[in-house]
Image (cartoon, rainbow, N blue to C red):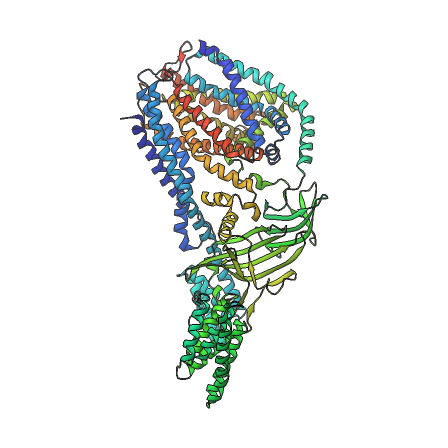
């Protein structure tokens, strides 16, 4: 049996005992006070795994040190001279073992740890949210704002489904409301509207197809549709296109028919519906999608109430107006359940523009969502400060919520488009608009903002806000050259990147050095392992934890220094030093001998 | 015999090594020194290393004496000669080398104070504009700064919101107040705390807590010895003598088992425990039961070092028992592992 094979059980025992000790430690230590019950078990488990991942290198070094020190005891019975080929044999086996361990460590560090850490953050922030919702619910109930209180209690129940505290609060609020109103409140009155109600954007018909659609609609005497398609064809056609005149002719014809339509109705209700339909259509044509939406929405309800009838014109134009509205506004109720699912908080970054001006952006919370195949995000407490070239503040505004999605620009690149205005789904006039704190943004600037950054960079900025040390290696590599545009110093990312890349080398150097120590302090040739030594064995992992942490600390200082002194190509220099270190420590192992 | 004669050289090498290691870690734990190092101001850095080396000389000499046991664990040395050498090293350190380091420290102190002042003035500069800086509880960014040190378009994110404060604030102008390391935004009554030292530059370079704890203990010990030397030389000799007596008792660790690796790890563990014990017993004087038992018979200055000496005696006794069981005689050569 080779020395490596003899070491393997000791190494595995270290990992198993290390994992068990991590679990024991997190289950014995008190959980964070703010954490709510449903998250405690997972929080403890994830913390234990993170603890294990953190101490994995130390366990590995300790396992190598102990395992090889025991196995070298027998091997050294034969005399070994310096530079003996037998040392090469030992090192070959050891290198395979070390590489396996280091690869596993990299997987744990870069693949497992970031997701565990982000889950822990989620558990803590959702626990805080739960308490905030309960507090909000209680104060809303005492101030008589039962709708707000009920919303808060239901949000708390979304986080902790079986919370007796939230259930009691909800019940109490409903009884209080019933007492006040003289009737039992309706259950689940909080609208939980699907967030994907808004259909996708405009169609992609060409001029000829639109004219065909117009002709078809005229044949079917569907004059609203005919006018709509004709106007769309007219707006799409170029000035030299003969179809532009044809489109206008069709539109005029359809409009005349629409105008005459009202005289055909005798019933006053039908006349009223027709005239409202006309008003909605006119609003849609003039670009007032918001007004059109409310008209068609009200009309649809009204028509439905007359024997459950359906008007296809109204339904179609409601969808069209919704599509148009979704380009400039979002609905307030879309954000009602967003907060408990926020994945990031207090995101802050700058955007430096090529003309010398800059924006500061601050977002209190971000909820990501995928709806109808489209990624979007709700930005709570979105604040934007625009600075002129000379540094003066052009404007500073804040919105309770903003909605962000990717919008393709003229250059074909996707940028984050932020809708700043929200409206009520039911009541016209209830709106959220940006609150201007300084300066005076234009109407367009306070309606939609297209952030001057690639859409993918937004996620990187959010990730950097959580802390550069928690960023994934791939994200650091993607972000490093653009980080300064967003206010994140490049040298910090360089230090982090190089530290991460050098970690496996450092572990290899430490592991080979442990091999040297294992040889020098191996078990005596005539000695047997005594059972009572086991009492002192736990000292080894602790000593290795100190050693690994010290080496990491010193390495980071050296890396930081090299990055500051040689900012252009620090990585080559550092890798050269690490290779030299690995070579040196391997040579040191070959230089061992039996005393 | 050759290995035995190498002991003084090895001891001097270990002494140099430990002075360097303790001084380096001590300097690296200081934010100002770290900034100077990262900016390539090596003169300040080396000047501080020398000062810290002199200051930590007593603790470093104790550690060097203890680590000499590692050498005798790996090499055959004559026990009788080794014991004599160990006693000689300890005596020379207590009566000559450590007091000499104190004299050098006193002479170097004014030059060091000047160095620190100039380093502080040098560090009194604004971190760069356009990037987010982290300070205690806040994140900062400003668009540009004027030669007078005023900040243009300052934005602040408060990590911990206090009552009445907004999380995010923007100011058209703000003044940097030199000397106090604070920023006074326009319209604010009180300056905000802001570290001038750009901590974000070395985020993640925080010293591991176990190193800080060890450094804190060795600093306490060295400073106490320094104070005692100038206040009461007898008390100094007693305290340092007891400490070296304790360190010499660590030879018991070399005989702990027939596995050198286990002995080496135990040696370091006991050495670390010694510094903790010294802090708890001699510095913090948290040994009420001992005070009650012997408080009436002994003066205070002798009581606490005596407690440590009792510990050392016990370890010496354990060492002698181990040595007798292993058949170690004064004429024999160590080690007895194979």
On the rendered image, what quadrant is the N terminus of chain A found in?
top left
A215 and A281: which is toward the camera = A215
Does B196 sit above or below residue B321?
A: below
Q: Quadrant of the C terminus of chain A?
A: top left
- The answer to whether residue A495 is above or below residue B229 is below
A540 to B234, vertically: above or below: below
Q: Residue at x 61, y 65 (%)?
A: A443
User: In this rendering, would B214 be left or right of B334?
Assistant: right
Residue B237 appears in which quarter of the rendering? top right
The picture places residue B169, in percent across and down from the top left corner, at 62, 54
On the image, the x and y values in percent for residue B163 come to 60, 56
Percent from the top left, x then y, of residue B30? Answer: 59, 34
Is A384 rendered above or below residue B59? below
Q: Position of residue A566 (x, y in %)?
A: 56, 33
| A412 sits left or right of B133 in the view | left
The quadrant where residue B16 appears: top right
Q: Residue at x 57, y 15 (%)?
A: B92
Q: Is residue A28 visible?
A: no
Question: Taking the image as drawn, is residue B215 in sight?
Answer: yes
* Residue farthest along the bottom direction in this orientation: A266
Q: Residue furthest right?
A: B148
Name the residue nearer the viewer: A204 or B82: A204
Count of residue discs: 0
* Camera-nearest residue between B61 and A346: A346
Q: Is residue A294 left or right of residue B256?
A: right
Q: Is residue A426 left or right of residue A589?
A: right
Instruction: Place residue B222 in its image quadrant.
Output: top right
């Amino acid at each position: 049996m080779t020395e490596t094979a003899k070491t393997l059980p000791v190494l595995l025992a270290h990992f198993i005992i290390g994992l068990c000790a991590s679990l024991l430690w997190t289950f014995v230590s008190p959980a964070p006070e703010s954490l709510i019950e449903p998250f405690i078990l997972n929080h403890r488990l994830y913390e234990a795994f993170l603890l294990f991942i953190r101490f994995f290198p130390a366990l590995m070094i300790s396992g190598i040190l102990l395992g090889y020190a025991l196995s070298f005891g027998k091997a050294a019975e034969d005399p070994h001279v310096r530079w003996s080929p037998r040392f090469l044999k030992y090192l070959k086996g050891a290198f395979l073992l070390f590489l396996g361990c280091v690869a596993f460590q990299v997987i744990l560090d870069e693949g497992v740890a970031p997701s565990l850490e982000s889950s822990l953050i989620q558990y803590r922030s959702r626990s805080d949210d739960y308490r905030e919702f309960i507090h909000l619910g209680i104060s809303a109930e005492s101030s008589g704002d039962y709708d707000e209180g009920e919303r808060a209690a239901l949000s708390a129940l979304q986080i902790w489904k079986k919370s007796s505290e939230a259930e009691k609060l909800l019940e109490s609020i409903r009884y209080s409301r019933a007492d006040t109103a003289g009737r039992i409140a309706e259950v689940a009155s909080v609208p939980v509207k699907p967030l994907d109600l808004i259909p996708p954007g405009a169609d992609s018909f060409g001029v000829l197809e639109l004219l065909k659609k117009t002709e078809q609609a005229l044949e079917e005497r569907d004059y609203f549709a005919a006018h709509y398609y004709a106007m769309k064809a007219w707006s799409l056609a170029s000035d030299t296109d003969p179809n532009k005149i044809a489109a206008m002719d069709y539109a005029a014809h359809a409009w005349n028919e629409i105008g005459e339509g009202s005289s055909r109705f005798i019933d006053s209700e039908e006349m009223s519906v027709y005239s409202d339909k006309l008003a909605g259509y006119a609003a849609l044509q003039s670009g007032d999608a918001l007004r059109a939406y409310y008209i068609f929405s009200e009309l649809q309800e009204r028509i439905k109430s007359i024997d459950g009838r359906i008007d296809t014109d109204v339904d179609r134009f409601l969808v069209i107006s919704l599509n148009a509205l979704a380009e400039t506004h979002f609905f307030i109720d879309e954000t009602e359940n967003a907060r408990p699912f926020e994945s990031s908080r207090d995101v802050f970054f700058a955007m430096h523009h090529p003309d010398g001006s800059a924006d500061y952006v601050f977002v209190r919370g971000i909820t990501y969502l995928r709806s109808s195949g489209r990624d979007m995000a709700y930005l709570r407490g979105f604040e934007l400060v625009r600075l002129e070239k000379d540094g003066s503040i052009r404007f500073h505004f804040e919105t309770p919520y903003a909605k962000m999605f990717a919008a393709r620009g003229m250059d074909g690149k996707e940028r984050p488009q932020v809708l700043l205005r929200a409206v009520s789904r039911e009541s016209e006039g209830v709106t959220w608009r940006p609150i201007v704190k300084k300066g005076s943004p234009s109407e367009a600037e306070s309606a939609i903002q297209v952030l001057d950054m690639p859409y993918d960079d937004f996620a990187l900025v959010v990730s950097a806000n959580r802390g550069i040390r928690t960023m994934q290696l791939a994200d650091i590599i993607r972000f490093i050259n653009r980080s300064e545009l967003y206010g994140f110093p490049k040298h910090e990312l360089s230090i982090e990147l190089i530290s991460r890349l050098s970690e496996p080398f450092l572990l290899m150097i430490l592991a080979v050095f442990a091999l040297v120590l294992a040889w020098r302090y191996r078990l005596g040739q005539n000695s047997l392992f005594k059972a009572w030594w086991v009492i002192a064995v736990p000292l080894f992992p602790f000593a290795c934890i100190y050693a690994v942490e010290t080496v990491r600390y010193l390495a980071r200082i050296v890396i930081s220094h090299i990055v500051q002194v040689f900012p252009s190509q620090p990585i080559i220099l550092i890798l050269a030093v690490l290779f030299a270190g690995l070579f040196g420590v391997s040579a040191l192992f070959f230089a061992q001998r039996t005393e | 015999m050759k290995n035995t004669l190498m002991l003084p050289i090895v001891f001097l090498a270990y002494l140099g090594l430990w002075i360097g290691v303790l001084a380096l870690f001590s300097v690296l734990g200081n934010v100002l020194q770290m900034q100077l190092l990262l900016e390539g101001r090596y003169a300040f850095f080396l000047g501080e290393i020398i000062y810290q080396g002199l200051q930590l000389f007593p603790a470093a000499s104790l550690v060097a004496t203890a680590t000499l046991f590692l050498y005798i664990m790996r090499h055959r040395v004559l026990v009788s000669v080794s014991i004599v050498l160990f006693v000689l090293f300890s005596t020379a350190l207590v009566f000559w080398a450590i007091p000499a380091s104190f004299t050098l420290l006193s002479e170097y102190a004014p030059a060091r104070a000047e160095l620190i002042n100039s380093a502080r003035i040098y560090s009194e500069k604004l971190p760069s504009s356009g990037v987010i800086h982290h300070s205690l509880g806040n994140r900062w960014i400003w668009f540009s700064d004027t030669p007078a040190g005023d900040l243009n378009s300052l934005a602040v994110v408060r990590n911990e919101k206090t009552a009445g404060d907004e999380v995010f604030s923007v100011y058209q102008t703000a003044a940097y107040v030199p000397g106090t390391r604070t920023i006074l935004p326009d319209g604010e009554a009180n300056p905000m705390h802001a570290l001038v030292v750009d901590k974000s530059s070395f985020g993640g370079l925080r010293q591991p807590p176990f190193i800080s704890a060890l450094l804190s203990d060795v600093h306490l010990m060295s400073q106490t010895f320094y104070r005692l030397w100038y206040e009461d030389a007898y008390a100094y000799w007693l305290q340092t003598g007891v400490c070296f007596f304790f360190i010499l008792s660590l030879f018991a660790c070399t005989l702990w088992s027939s596995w050198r690796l286990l002995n080496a790890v135990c040696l370091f563990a006991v050495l670390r425990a010694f510094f903790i014990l010294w802090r708890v017993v001699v510095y913090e004087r948290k040994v009420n039961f001992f005070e009650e038992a012997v408080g009436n018979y002994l003066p205070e200055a002798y009581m606490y070092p005596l407690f440590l000496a009792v510990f050392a005696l016990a370890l010496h006794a354990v060492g002698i028992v181990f040595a007798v069981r292993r058949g170690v005689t004064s004429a024999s050569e160590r080690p007895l592992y194979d």
